[in-house]
Amino acid sequence: EAGVTQFPSHSVIEKGQTVTLRCDPISGHDNLYWYRRVMGKEIKFLLHFVKESKQDESGMPNNRFLAERTGGTYSTLKVQPAELEDSGVYFCASRGGTGELFFGEGSRLTVL
Amino acid sequence: DQQVKQNSPSLSVQEGRISILNCDYTNSMFDYFLWYKKYPAEGPTFLISISSIKDKNEDGRFTVFLNKSAKHLSLHIVPSQPGDSAVYFCAAILNSGGSNYKLTFGKGTLLTVNP
């Protein structure tokens, strides 16, 4: 069974540019989460999808961040325009009905 | 304001000895606690968990202890092995029986097990 996959593994962009991160959850997992770890800080919750619906987006930093999950399968997280403080590792995780979260390897974003 | 705190950024132990990683929390409404292990360039991997109705959970070499009155939990690894070297994150959930399952993480503790 394939795990949670994320793309790209690393993205380097300049301030003001746009980046889109993609997450493919484990097949059949309705719950999909985005988390972020800024250097030296804790991993922080961004938002939670149940299928295609946003269940909780209380952790989204501001309106430069847009997450979508069309069709309830893969999800994208777009940052537009990117700022220096957006640099960090963005983790996606998925979960079935019960049980634990399975995390992807993360997408490292570097904003110069 | 951090609700889950891991006050030791790093810990170094000898192979075969016990590793004890500590975690404190401030929100008494957390009812489920987890430990995740993370290797470089990988995502966190679930290790062990404990419900707030218990004070101990054991899985092989890993044991988690919960002291609700002190709002403290610890992860014991015995015996420690070099392959245990990783960053360990403590995490907590509010209302774990609900649909959200949102984790609040600590900053992590880097464990190094020396051969």
Image (tube, coloured by chain):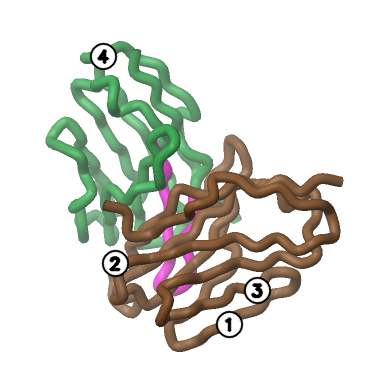
Chain colours: A green, B brown
Which residue in the structure is indicated by mark 1? B56
Q: Disc 3 or disc 2, which is closer to the eye?
A: 3
- State left or right for residue A69 relative to residue B49: left
Which residue in the structure is indicated by mark 4? A15
Residue B93 percent coordinates (x, y): 36, 68
Real-space CA distance between mark 3 and mark 1, rounded to the nearest whole angstrom:
7 Å
Q: Disc 4 or disc 2, which is closer to the eye?
A: 4
Which residue in the structure is indicated by mark 2? B100
Which residue in the structure is indicated by mark 3? B63
Please report, as a chain letter, where disc 2 is located.
B
Residue B106 visible (yes or no): yes
Real-space CA distance between mark 3 and mark 4, rounded to the nearest whole angstrom:
45 Å
Residue at x-position 60% and y-position 60%:
B21
> What amino acid does circle 4 point to?
Lys
Circle 3 Cα neighbour tier, 10 Å, few/some/many (<14 / 14–19 / ≥20) = some
Please report, as a chain letter, where disc 1 is located.
B
Helix, strand or loop status at disc 4: loop
Furthest residue to the bottom?
B53
Circle 1 Cα neighbour tier, 10 Å, few/some/many (<14 / 14–19 / ≥20) = some
